[in-house]
Amino acid sequence: MPIIEVNHVTKEYQLGHITSLKENVANSYRRLMGKPIHRREDFKALDDVSFSIEQGEVVGIIGHNGAGKSTLLKHLANISKPTKGSVIVRGSVAPLIEVGAGVNPELTGRENIFLNGAILGIPKKIIQQKLDEIIEFSELEQFIDTPVKRYSSGMTVKLGFSIATSLDADILIVDEVLAVGDLAFQRKCFDRMEDMIKRQGKTVLLVSHNIRQIQRLCNRVILLDHGRINMEGEPQAVCDSFYEQSDRKIRANIDHTKTHTIASGEVELVELYFLDHAKRKVDSLSYNENCSIHFKINVLEELEDVTFGFGFHTTDFLYLTTHNSEEQLNINRLPAGDHELVCKVNRLPLLPGIYLVRFGITSGKAAAGVFYGESLAHFQVIGDIPITVRDGFFALEANWMQIGV
Amino acid sequence: MVKNLYNYRELIAALVWKNIVIRYKQSYLGILWAVLKPIMLMLIFTLVRSFVGIDTGNIPYPILTFAALLPWVFFQESASEGVNSVTSNAALIKKIYFPREVFPITAMVTKIVELAISFGILGAMMIYYKMMPTVYSLWIPIVVFYTMMVTLGISFFGAAINVYYRDMSQALPVVLSLLMYGSPVMYPLSLVHQKLIVEQAAGHWSNNLYTLYTLNPLAGIIDSFQRVMLKGLAPDFEALYPGVVLTLVILPFSYVFFKRAENWFADVI
């Protein structure tokens, strides 16, 4: 028998403000008189969602903002009730939905452990037994008798997570909580989650925007889109499909985002385009193929000792690589007028995805910046990649071998 | 409901403890503030009484009115806290499930602690006035329990309404302060009885009016409090029963209403 059953669940919310008593009375009057009433628009946060989860499964739920992930979890945690359909949960649920919801700023850390434990339904005896463990995990030994209002926000979340994960329930519902604290603590949280999943055999529902995490932890992934189940199955397949969707969405958005440019007025960037290995103008490049990037500039005032540089970055401005023209291109004097520069890339090592280009020009002995811009153009990398380079941004040229055979 | 209560006793205990700790944590006088209200009211009423003259029989007025204020303040505060208890815990309601009646009940139990402290003061006053408690004071737990039921009847209904229309939390204090004058707090019930039943002051309406007056459960509660604590008498059932009947009708209705509305708290709050 499945431990969680979700049968044709639909959840509607009314948009806009809650109707006032006055409006309700007015509506009742209109209904009595047989006139049309003022109805607010409905919004379907979940639309006929059905699935079931067996004991011990680890299921990830992914989707864009507003796809209905958190609403779904709220139904599983019995916080909301569906408009239509039913949710059957056979077992105790530990909702790690925004940990620290019950943390009270006036109480000390220790007091909060007991209060939160009670809120989560952990018997006092168990809390007392686990008290040292919880405090140790939270790394707050020194501050445990200080009111939480004097804590930093990171410390508060650490405390919340430590309490919540000490709860011994059949089903864990986790909503983005792994993104807490500093890197070391995140690591610890992740390990604890993994321990609960792999060794204690708990049933886990995980919502995260960190698709890599989902891929690593789950045996099954559900992709929600506008309140419907878009896809369900193998983590690999579903996550890939989600990546594709996201890329399309990013592409659609990039055209509307402004580029960030700082220019001294001596140079203008006229055009930036990509040529593939067959010298065709394209905006998607193939992985592991040669290509070139062309920059057309208009120099308004003559420049001396010019260096060019360009780089790739992700949509969230992670600089992946840069390459500048020093020692490859010596330009002592660049007269006013139109110029074109090319940078040839051999066997593009970027893995499929969306990337953006930044470009800069410096001039003079002191290499003063005369032009710098980010997100100047975007391109998609397509193509099949070998199984050895699954995750990340780059393919590494490397080989495995066993020594001594 | 009783089963639920038992299952969630630790939660209620923890929340009550939290309420008390938080309220008085940074204050010098601490929980003594809780008893300030009945004491102040008692002093004011005693002052007023020195002008208007209210017949209290052989019992000193200050202690009589303090004994009335004990259940009244408990009722008033736990009803208003109860009505606000769901909305003021919005963060919890949106994140974690447990039966929502825990909130109004917690608000009430918190006030029980304050009531207990007030009882200490009443005891001190009884020593001062050289009054001995009688065996009838064993009625107190029952009277307090009845007061709790009356409070919950209002809290459940009011708290659920308040989630949808915050008008409730605005209206309730007004209604309650009016109700105080309609309850035998400043004056003893015996005066009302004297006027309506003995003197028939309102003509042939008098008996009905008295029933209407005692339909307010607080009339019976306050009178019983004074009788069993100060007068050494059993409660006056004639004054109690209209209120008891009303409470027995309202409480189940109020609870069912609350449980129905509970399903949408997280969406609306």
Image (spheres, rainbow, N blue to C red):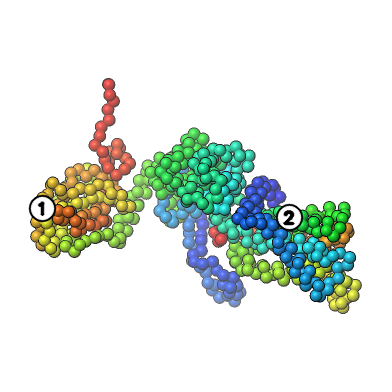
In the displayed structure image, the side of residue A157 where residue A250 appears, left or right: left
Residue under label 2, please give it.
B117
For residue B204, which quarter of the picture?
Answer: bottom right
Relative vertical location of residue A66 with respect to residue A132 in this rendering, above or below: below
Can you give x and y, in whole percent of width and height, for residue B56 in the image?
86, 68
* Chain at numbered mark 1: A
* Chain at numbered mark 2: B
Q: How many marks?
A: 2
Give the residue drawn at x 21%, y 61%.
A263
Q: Secondary structure at mark 1?
A: strand
In the displayed structure image, the side of residue A264 where residue A83 appears, left or right: right
Is label 1 on the same chain as label 2? no
Tell us which disc is closer to us: 1 or 2.
2
Give the residue drawn at x 74%, y 66%.
B41
Give the residue type at disc 2.
Ile
Q: Secondary structure at mark 2?
A: helix
Of residues A290 and A190, the one nearer the viewer is A190
Label 2 Cα neighbours within 10 Å, binned few <14 / some 14-19 / many ≥20: some
Give the residue drawn at x 35%, y 52%.
A246
Can you give x and y, in whole percent of width and height, for residue A237 in the image?
37, 43
In the displayed structure image, the side of residue A310 where residue B54 appears, left or right: right
For residue A134, which quarter of the picture?
Answer: top right
